[in-house]
Image (cartoon, rainbow, N blue to C red):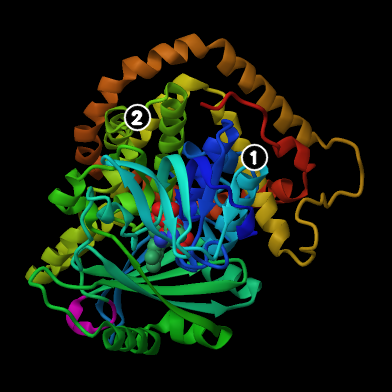
Amino acid sequence: MNDTIQSSYDVVVVGAGFGGTAAAHYTARHGLSTLVIERAENIGEKIISGLTIPIYGFLFGPGFIRDGAPPVERPVDGIINYIVIDIDRGDIAIDDTLRVPKPLAPIFAFGYNAYCADFCQWQADEAARVGATIISGMVVSDLIIEDGVVRGVVLEDGRTITAKIVINAEGSQGLLSVKAGIRKKYPPRVISLADTYDYAMDKQDVDRIFGHSIRFLWGWDEQDLAPPLGYGNGLMVWPYGKSLHFMQDQCLAKDDGTVQNLKKRFETYHENVTGKLLWWKDDVEDKTELRAHTWQCFEIFVGLDDELREMPLFTGGMLIIGDAAGLESTELCDGVPSAWFSADIAGRVATEAIEAGDVSGEFLSRYDREIRNHPIIAWSITAPHRYLLRHAQESHDEKLLKKYVHNGWGFEALAHTVVPLTLVFLRVLRQDPRIMTSWVRMYFRYYRHWHHTFSADSSNPGKSLRDHEDQTIGEYIFSFLMWWTDLLLFVFWPFLWLMSYLLVPLVHLTKWTAGFFVWLYEPLWVRLLKWLDAKAVGLTDALTRFAANANPDIFSAKKRREP
Ligand SMILES: Cc1cc2nc3c(=O)[nH]c(=O)nc-3n(C[C@H](O)[C@H](O)[C@H](O)COP(=O)(O)OP(=O)(O)OC[C@H]3O[C@@H](n4cnc5c(N)ncnc54)[C@H](O)[C@@H]3O)c2cc1C
């Protein structure tokens, strides 16, 4: 396969992770000859085994992912935070206020859990389908730089490949941008080391014990149950289709430069938490079988480091995307949405630059500006709540601990995210309001695909379970609603376009008011959640049955103009 590489391409992408394959899809789809070079033998295997991709990545990210059927392991409907005050006394507070209410959940998911290898391979296949060449098992060891402009890459075997533009998507461990002299190596205090256990578990057990929620655990440092507050996560448990991840992470160094023996610390946390946490001990432990134990780094606090945040994301002939650009979120450590957003922007800017015959730094600086002006990226790399947890520890203030957890991973997180999410929503509404029906179809398609992948008969995920060809009333209503909504959105497009501009100042105002009035609407929200939990069970079942059994054609993506 490697013999088929040409000596020159329009675009060479370094790294076939979430960002690289998405950028390659963009440039290949726009007719540019595109080569992706991945160092791992198997695509996705060097990232992390699995993760939760938040919904805003799917809603506002690359169209081919939204309109496709990627391999998701489980729709996620929310977070359950366990705030451990004293584990020996069983004093554990629960904050599960950040979740999608029934009957919307689990179809209208809050995010999707996925294994990186499967997901990135799917993205790579999609990029190859539109013409990109993907090679794996090959390391890019250097850049070709002439007169300060990147002109291509050097492979580990010494071969050189020239490119009009290099898209650097080499992730958090990459050094090519450092070699190009535009970025600095990430210091140990912004890098977190994650320790992940992958357990096999019966789907029925995962469904019954975890449902569709991910679980976080936070606790005082001296309890040794989880990494120190503010220097890492507590414990995260992610449910997948037929498996479970147990993940904890801690920064390589503390602010004072202290470096700990993390292997030893992680073993202690793992032992303590699995030995003392009742739901793990009683419900989970004997139903799981350890399949793998992995270690991975990510650049969690780059966005909070003023110097690193200011460093350029481009130079003549090269654009840096995703983790390589330090775009991982400081709160949830989610970096996939920003990798996707930056991939789309880089793909577009690279296409424009090549069309204009100008790959100079001056031309490519528009990429940097767009990234910095992207409301979700800007928010996600500067959100401080996870970092602030260290103050809760210093003062050992229980109220403060609960407050920061609630701000970052409870209902109040919505008050902080409402502005960036709405601003991006208004942008996409301006381009084509019918994206809203694409989202509805996506939710149903993803749920259906997931259901059939992990149901008893998983041999054909696209198969309909119906034994007749006639359209059911539910299918008729769904198609009718989608058709009419599309038509109305199209007719009112000029009005929505105008509103998308007029509402911007109001949305900015929400930044101040949303947090202020939380005390008023949060109790109402919590009551509503409880009420719906009890009352909406039947409707939730009906919706999931409909999603699983309907003719898959009605959930297919409709053709829309993509930018
Ligand atoms: C423990 C952990 C938990 C995480 N949890 C989440 C989560 O829950 N949600 C979320 O959204 N994100 C999460 N992330 C972050 C997410 O994995 C990254 O933000 C995302 O993968 C970034 O995409 P990327 O394309 O920039 O880089 P990556 O996906 O890391 O891809 C980089 C690719 O480049 C390849 N590469 C590197 N150097 C070279 C080279 N010289 N030559 C050729 N190939 C090279 C690598 O092998 C890799 O495949 C987590 C990360 C970790 C480590």
Q: Give the percent coordinates (x, y) of residue 173.
A: 34, 63
- The residue lying at 23 percent from left, 34 percent from top is 511
* Disc 1 CB within 8 Å of nearest ligand 1 atom: no
Which residue is tagged 1?
130
Looking at the rendered structure, the kind of residue marked 2 is: Leu
Instruction: State the SS at label 1.
Output: loop
Q: Is residue 393 left or right of residue 243?
A: left
Front position among marks 2 and 1: 1
The reply to whether the magenta stretch includes residue 222 is: yes
Instruction: State the SS at label 2.
Output: helix
Which residue is tagged 2?
423
Give the vertical position of 512 relative to 143 (above or below).
above
Q: Is residue 549 left or right of residue 431?
A: right
- Nearest the eye: 533 or 140: 140
The reply to whether the magenta stretch includes residue 462 is: no
Give the vertical position of 276 relative to 55 (above or below).
below
Please tell me which of labels 2 and 1 falls first in the chain.
1
Q: Give the percent coordinates (x, y) of residue 100.
A: 47, 49
- Nearest the eye: 436 or 481: 436
For label 2, the crowd category at 10 Å Cα-Cα, with few meaning under 14, some 14 to 19 and many 20 or more, is many
Looking at the rendered structure, which numbered label has been put on residue 170? none
- The residue lying at 74 percent from left, 36 percent from top is 554
- The residue lying at 44 percent from left, 78 percent from top is 294
Which span of residues is magenta-colored?
A: 220-226
The image quarter containing residue 272 is bottom left
Which quarter of the figure is the N terminus placed in? Answer: bottom right
Looking at the rendered structure, the kind of residue marked 1 is: Val
